[in-house]
Amino acid sequence: MDSILLDTSFCIRLLKSNDDLHQNAKDYFKFFLEKKIEIFLSSIVVAEYSVKDDPTNLPLEFVKIIPFDFFDGKTAGEFHSILLSHKEQVANIDRNVIKDDCKLMAQLFNRNIQGYITKDRKSFNQIISPIKATKSFEIELLDLEIPLKNFKGELF
């Protein structure tokens, strides 16, 4: 993996020192920097993060901000259409969450970003899997709840 997109849930935990997943977020971010993994931040994530905190608090000097453009909009619409044919899988997910996740998946897909880190494990199977299967694209999904050492397969 040479590139990663950060989800809003990751950004929140990275900067919220009293959160249970703060250390995991810090460890992953340090790992990305050490391994020279290109770190992307979507303008959509910036908008979501801005609801509760000033986005200039984010580690902007270490990330590349990607705008949501026409081609992302087109792809997000295609992805949302795919999910409409899987209504039973997404029935219990807020419609706005589905739309925003489709937008982020479109940015991953259009820019060939190889990884995505989030705390929202539910989206892996319910939203991302049907899109991946239909569009035949690969992405490494990192679950923020899994400590970095476990992700790397280390015992200690």
Image (cartoon, rainbow, N blue to C red):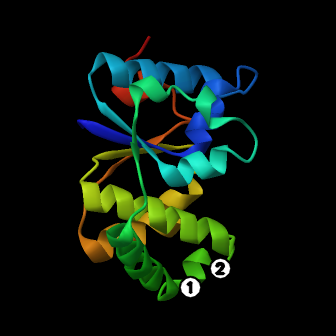
For image coordinates 55% across by 24% down, the residue present is 24
Residue located beneath label 2 in the image: 91
Q: Residue at x 65, y 75 (%)?
A: 95
In the image, residue 55 sits, relative to residue 118, either above or below, namely: above
Q: Is residue 57 above or below residue 66?
A: above
Q: Amino acid at mark 1?
A: Lys
Tell me, yes or no, if residue 153 can be seen here. no
Q: Residue furthest top?
A: 156
Q: In the rendered view, tell whether residue 51 sits above or below residue 73.
A: above
Residue farthest along the bottom direction in this orientation: 85
Q: Which residue is mark 1?
A: 87
Q: Position of residue 6 (x, y in %)?
A: 47, 41
Where's residue 2, x and y in %?
A: 23, 35
Residue 52 at x, y percent in the picture: 76, 42
Crowdedness near tag 2: few (<14), some (14–19) or many (≥20) residues, C-alpha within 10 Å:
few
- Label 2 element class: loop
Q: CA distance from mark 2 to mark 1?
A: 6 Å
Question: Where does the C terminus fall, quadrant-wise?
Answer: top left
Query: Residue at position x 38%, y 81% from top?
Result: 78
Residue 61, quarter of the rendered image: top left
Q: Is residue 1 left or right of residue 53?
A: left
The answer, for residue 115, to whether it is visible in the render is yes
Whether residue 94 is situated above or below residue 13 in the rendered picture:
below
* Front one among 13 and 53: 53
Describe residue 105's horizontal placement relative to residue 143 as left or right.
left
